[in-house]
Amino acid sequence: MEGNLVIVESPAKAKTIQKFLGDGYVVKPCFGHIRDLQEKKLSVDIDGGFIPEYVIPSEKKKVVEDLRKASSKAQTVWLASDEDREGEAISWHLMETLKLDPSKARRIVFHEITKDAILDAVKNPRSLDMNLVNAQQARRVLDRLVGFELSPVLWKKIQRGLSAGRVQSVALRLIVDKEREILAFKPEAFYRVDGFFDIAGTKAKGTLSTRFTGIDEARKFLEDSIGANYSVDSVEKKEGTRFPAPPFTTSTLQQEAARKLHFPVSVTMRVAQGLYEKGLITYMRTDSVNLSSLALGTAKQFITENFGAEYSHPRQFKTNSKGAQEAHEAIRPTFIANTGIEGSEQEKKLYSLIWKRTVASQMEEARVMNTSIKVNSDRRPEYYTVQASQVLFDGFLKLYIEGVDDQDSEDENVILPEISCGTAVKGDKFEASCKYTQAPYRYSEATLVKKLEELGIGRPSTYAPTISTLTTGRGYVIKGDKEGIKVQVTNLSLKGGKISESTKSETLGAEKGKLLPRDIGVIVSDYLTANFPGIMDYDFTANVEKEFDHIAEGDAQWTKVIGEFYEPFHKKVDISTADKQFNHIERKLGCDPSDGEVIIAKFGQYGPFVQKGEGDSKICASLGKGQLIESITLEEALALFKLPRVVGEYEGVGITATKGKFGPYLKYGDKNISLPKGVDPVSVTLEECIGLIVKDAGKPAGNEIIKEFQASDISIINGRYGPYIKHAGANYKIPAGKSAGELTEAECNEIIAQGPVAHKHRRYTKR
């Protein structure tokens, strides 16, 4: 017998725990779940009470065999998977599959991988919590039933290869509904007037209390203001308090890492997982904002020693998220004294973010003096408001400000002079600027996570996989930029008694890095919402999560919960399957003014496209990235027929101007040459093209597009160090032996699923 066998999920976690336990313990990884439902079968015995039919995947058979041998030789087997429902289920599957004797199996849990936590867990083992296991089984079975029964309906009604999911489909609806809200929004112009004043020697900007609906009103206001005298009408000072944000939960970490570090949600979770397994932070999947008494004490000591006792304010936060569960701590450093770590650049940045947030949460509130001065004119009843904020005591602001980049973290600290009512002030300049009302913002990955959490949809473990499924797995959504609409505006300025005009171009609705629904996503969401309103209802989905919570607490029987859901759902599936009508989507955009041919936007076998004419003479063009059938204009559709455009030849090789994921470019033989900013592929001349080709010939090879799969947002690029795959802003290494030019879309998705390249020596340029 070999004493003690400890089974954990990952090799990294095993390595860290082995270091703490030492001789007498063998720590082995199981690499996550060792059993799951069958991949291509329902694998749920509906008539037998929804009992799942588990199998060992082929890639896990060797792992299971190794664990069987090791467990048969051990006196005690310690099941040390994560302390949540998924972790509990992994331990249960190990018990069942390895046929462990309950008398020699021990379940241990910990929310941080430190020596004290591990040794304490070994001293205090517990039995398996079957309520947690059943809650996980209920989620897995319900998701399988929804996906397995709804997906064939989508195949018959829309297109083969589609899928639906209990959480993913509701998240998709959120994105589609937001897009429709934006499409329905009509921006309205208005004029905002700003005044620039000299208040007792201090320059200050004030904003007029009234907006004007048009340029004539704004001009009349400025005309009336010529020669006006200004004075202080009121001064209001109010001391305010700013409170630190709570320590991180999974959701808030994802949001803040996106804002400050520009990490996609999947990257945040991958990096956090690595930090946890190295023993540097506590468990990264949590709803809780609580800190342990030990963490509170060490934070107080660190703050007192490094900032002073006046900066310390120990506090415990309450969890307010809808449906919060899992009794973990917030995400925090395991040792507050470790202000920095060894690791990759991503690990260092994320650790620093977690460390600062944790320590700041235990610091004193900041005190600020907010001053508001009302400036009146002797010509018009409107008034200007000058506002300033002076920091009296910085408190937690010394360390961390939520939502602000570190390089911009200096808090605004404007000090206005002491001034009394009636004091005259000088107006230096006045600007009437044309602005437009702002449409709602589209979801980013982080704001979608925030919305899902607010609605109680999904749990910390589901946010990242849900977004990945929508973007990479199903292609219902792409992550990209919206260029916006350019408009010409006229602004007015009053200075020295004279009014001047200036025109400039404004861009409305431009957004970067947002989740944009593709037509297939819109069609699927609309179909499911119309035919399966229960599945797509936000409250229903949140209530299902509550049912899982009741199961986890032992207050509900899991198979009964599944049964109550399945019967009405299955009847609806039967009705929808019996309906033979195909979900046909098309929209007439108008006629081509050059020849009168009808232009129609449609959804076909290979995705959305626009069609000109009918019969044998018809021509078609695929919609571009971010374009939708229901919003594409006739002008945009006509432009699609112009590309790709054959420009001519050079040295016997054809030149084609077209547009791809990275903008317009020339295709010259097997080379792709980017067009400079401002050069239109529709109008670029042959001479200009030849000049670019000649210029490019003198450059070293690199960063050429070898192949594109625009529908999946995938590009294969010949970079400086060889070919690689680019997807959703991340780079992926092509395995040895694979030919970049011969890769299929499916092969690219398999490579992407393995994770992006870790850049250890990336150079960053200061902005």
Image: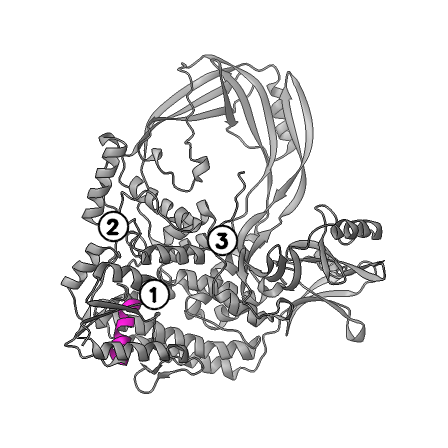
The residue where tag 2 is placed is 290
Tell me which residue sits at (58%, 80%) in the image.
581
Query: Dot 3 lies on which element?
Result: loop
Q: Position of residue 651 (x, y in %)?
A: 85, 59
Q: Amino acid at mark 2?
A: Asn
Which disc, if any, is residue 759?
3
**Mark closest to the chain's N terminus, 2 or 3:** 2
Q: Quadrant of the C terminus?
A: top right
Please say if 721 is above or below 139.
above
Query: Dot 2 lies on which element?
Result: loop
Q: Amino acid at mark 1?
A: Pro
**Location of residue 32 (image quadrant):** bottom left
As rendered, which of 601 and 295 lies closer to the eye?
Answer: 295
**Location of residue 97 (image quadrant):** bottom left
Q: Which residues are magenta?
A: 86-97
As rendered, which of 208 and 355 lies closer to the eye?
Answer: 355
* Cα–Cα gap, marks 3 and 1: 22 Å
Question: Residue 627, can we see it?
Answer: no
Q: Residue furthest front?
A: 23
Question: Residue 463, can we see it?
Answer: yes
Query: How many other residues sit within 10 Å of disc 1, few (<14), some (14-19) or many (≥20)?
Result: some
Examine the structure image and report whether residue 88 is included in the region drawn in magenta: yes
Task: From the image, give the main secondary structure of the stretch colored magenta.
Answer: helix
The residue where tag 1 is placed is 11
Q: Amino acid at mark 3?
A: His
Please say if 266 is above or below 613.
above
Viewed as shown, does residue 564 lie left or right of 509? left
Tell me which residue sits at (17%, 63%) in the image.
122
